Amino acid sequence: MSSFRSEPILWIHVAGLATLPIFLPLCLLFLAVGDRSLPIWLELLVVGAIGTLPLLWMQLRRPFYIFALLGVAIKPETLSEPQRKILCLVNTKLNRLLAVFGAVLSVAVLGLLYQATPHVANIARLLPQWRGLALLLAGLFFFASNLFLQIPLSVARVFVTKETEFAALEPLSLEKIKQDFTILGVRVNQILPQLTGKVKTEE
């Protein structure tokens, strides 16, 4: 039978980690723009809150519906049984702990970025020196980096699940999917083709 790990959208979400080297340097750049008029702790609080709190709240309350990409989401009623089982693994207490861990890690990285701002000061001077706007943009790029960290963390549980454990799962009902997940985007029947290759199952 086809392994649940061959679900293409899982691998696309993991590949989202590759965007971190794009968003984090942009966050760093805007942190270096303009003269600081607020205490450092307050600026960090503002940028950190923009970047982490909305995503953390979502992941703790109603996790991101992983069968969605770039503003398009697969209709819950068209999900296959293995896909509905995957959602069971995404909405767990362990995943909530991973979400908290991801938020704490991101805040620690933000502190390091703030310390590194002198290294990009010369480049930052080429931009308009509007500190308020720069902090907002830093927060938005920090938010983007958190998004592409939190979603791979949410699917990590799937990859460490044994085939036998997965087979014993009860598929999540349509009502629970709509109730428990944040579904963003235009709903369609299919986003990506499903892989049909045979794989050897694990014991």
Image (cartoon, rainbow, N blue to C red):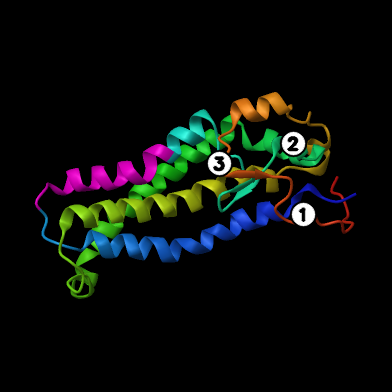
Is residue 167 a member of the stretch shown in magenta?
A: no
Residue bearing mark 2: 84
Quadrant into which the C terminus falls:
top right
Which disc is residue 6 wearing? Answer: 1
Type of amino acid under label 1: Ser
Sequence-wise, the earlier of marks 1 and 3 is 1
Type of amino acid under label 3: Leu
Identity of the residue drawn at 62% across and 33% down: 91
Q: Residues within 10 Å of mark 1 (few under 14, many from 20)?
A: some
Sequence-wise, the earlier of marks 2 and 3 is 2
Q: Where is residue 156 in the image (x, y as percent from the top left)?
A: 62, 47
Q: From which residue to which does the magenta span run?
A: 37-54
Q: What element carries label 2?
A: helix
Q: Residues within 10 Å of mark 2 (few under 14, many from 20)?
A: many
Sequence-wise, the earlier of marks 2 and 1 is 1
Type of amino acid under label 2: Arg
Q: What element carries label 1?
A: helix
Identity of the residue drawn at 79% across and 54% down: 194
Task: Tell me whether the residue at label 2 lies in contact with that at label 1, contact meaning CB atoms closer than 8 angstroms.
Answer: no
Relative to 101, residue 15 above or below: below
- Alpha-carbon span between mark 2 and mark 3: 17 Å
Is residue 50 a member of the stretch shown in magenta?
A: yes
Identity of the residue drawn at 60% across and 40% down: 65
Q: To which quarter of the image does residue 168 belong?
A: top right
- Alpha-carbon span between mark 2 and mark 1: 14 Å
Q: Is mark 3 on a helix, strand or loop?
A: loop
